[in-house]
Image (cartoon, grey):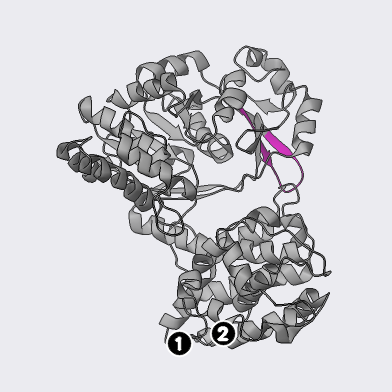
Amino acid sequence: MKLNYAGIQDRAAWEAAGIALPEFDWKAMCAETEARPTWVHFGAGNIFRGFIARLQQSLLNRGLVKGGIVAADTFDFDIIDKIYKPFDSMTLMVSLLPDGSMKKEVVASIARGLRAGSAHPEDLEELRKIFRNPSLQMASFTITEKGYALKNIQGQFFPFVEADFKNGPANCSHAMSIVASLLLSRFEAGAAPIAIVSMDNCSHNGEKLRASVMTVVDKWLENGFVSEAFAAWVRDESKVSFPWSMIDKITPRPAKVVEEALARDGVEDMAAIVTSRNTFIAPFVNAEQPQYLVIEDRFPNGRPPLEEAGVYMTDRDTVNNTEKMKVTTCLNPLHTALAVYGCLLGYNSIAAEMRDPELKALVEKIGYDEGIPVVVDPKILSPMDFIHEVVDQRLPNPFIPDAPQRIATDTSQKVAIRFGETIKSYVARPDLDPATLEFIPLAIAGWLRYLLAVDDAGEAMACSGDPMLETLQGQLAGVKLGEPKSAQGKLSPILSNATLFGVDLSAVGLGEKIEGMFRELIAGPGAVRATLQRHLG
């Protein structure tokens, strides 16, 4: 069985293999999308294929929409060439259930994939044609928070962004510049309204996207490439809106066990590839079944009935509160604690960590005991139900091949939100004292111990990528496992860095506690385990 339009005509074979097929006419969907496009999505990877495209598939299956989505990638063109084109832009979605079973579905709601880069002018012209069409309602994004960044960590514009400012809309390369140039095409074709919707997993995502696009537009205005009328149109959110959203679904890299299961089912050519941009991707997506998407309902040119596909359409405050619930209390802090301690203890599976008594107790203490008392309740979702699902079903799912090493990436960019926000809530509440916190400080101490790049057995350990890694390791230079006194004076400058943690940890009474825990953790080989047992036993 081949994953393409011709291949799925043998419906009996796919159904015999337990693989659900689309319930709409794929060719009619493609024709409708060509004539009257409504949705373009930037970022053609797994979260899009395994979650967002399935939303449209659900609507197509029920006859609630007629057109599909046009996918575009501004970064990794191999995804389009090797994962989209050979398979008619179809994806085999595999939901990994906690009982070990798999729920499989062919997702065929993507009409086509395009390479949004100056090296492919024919694809860019197709995108311009789509953006000129007044039928287009939205452009959405899953390009990661880095995709919106115009500046380096020193606050300087990247050289290629500076080149975009200088070269103008006709010859640009950065994703944000390309979006600005496509908006210019739309403006010049009649200025029909549109929603520009970040679906990336970062705080205030719509605000970040809008700020980056407007920076490009303002620079082009300054350099004489665009008119004040165009800049005013992009600024006017009744014409070009930038809704906020919260997204949640774990979509790890494709697993060999899933590839082998599909081969046994008779599905051909499912092997994963590594692209020239080092993306590990396959014609299938494997992911957990739980998923959440909450979107601010500001679409000036209309939108698909996404609420019929399970999306929460609401106001900005509710989106913000849902994001805070997830990122500061109910999921992300638990993930980070598991990530750093999992690496130190030699784990390569989050699910395996949840079978470790001390690690399971650590995340329960961080979540239930220290987080829930200050959790933001978004009202549309119950924080307690959400965290129970995370702790009891999602993190322990042994069939989700997610690794602490992946989650430990860029931790310095996350701790201010994942731990700092809860600490700040304790500071703000007259009935709570941040100095009473025990387990969030233990997670922070664990991260600092992780930065030594030595595991609990005393062996060298690779740290995941992080823009602050070199700086922080430099500050910890001279700290040695087995020599707690070597930490003297090393941690105080780090812990008092309010930019890093969102709060000066020493000023709120946690500095000495974290330093004490850190000294426990570096007492010698086995000290990480002993420290966890001491605090969680």
Which residue does the image show at 27% across and 29% down from the upper left? 186
Q: Secondary structure at mark 2?
A: helix
Q: Position of residue 96 (x, y in %)?
A: 70, 42
Q: Position of residue 207 (x, y in %)?
A: 35, 52
Q: Earlier in the sequence, mark 1 or mark 2?
A: 1
Which residue does the image show at 47% across and 29% down from the upper left? 71
**Mark-to-mark CA distance, 1 and 2:** 21 Å
Q: Position of residue 107 (x, y in %)?
A: 58, 28
Which residue does the image show at 51% across and 26% down from the upper left? 109
Q: How many marks?
A: 2
Q: Amino acid at mark 2?
A: Gly
In the rendered structure, does residue 92 fall within the stretch colored magenta? yes
Residue 116 against residue 199 in the figure, above or below? above
Does residue 417 appear to the left or right of 367 in the view shown?
Answer: left
In the rendered structure, does residue 521 fall within the stretch colored magenta? no
Q: Position of residue 52 (x, y in %)?
A: 50, 37
Residue, disc 2:
511
Boundaries of the magenta span? 90-103
Q: Is residue 237 visible?
A: no
Residue, disc 1:
431
Judge by depth and name the residue closer to the eye, 500 or 97. Answer: 500
In the rendered image, the quadrant that contains the N terminus is top right
Q: Secondary structure at mark 1?
A: loop
Q: Residue furthest left?
A: 229
Residue 525 against residue 80 in the figure, above or below? below
Count neighbours of disc 1 (C-alpha within 10 A) and say few if under 14, some if 14 to 19, many if 20 or more: few
Residue 315 against residue 427 in the figure, above or below? above
Which residue does the image show at 16% across and 40% down from the upper left? 228
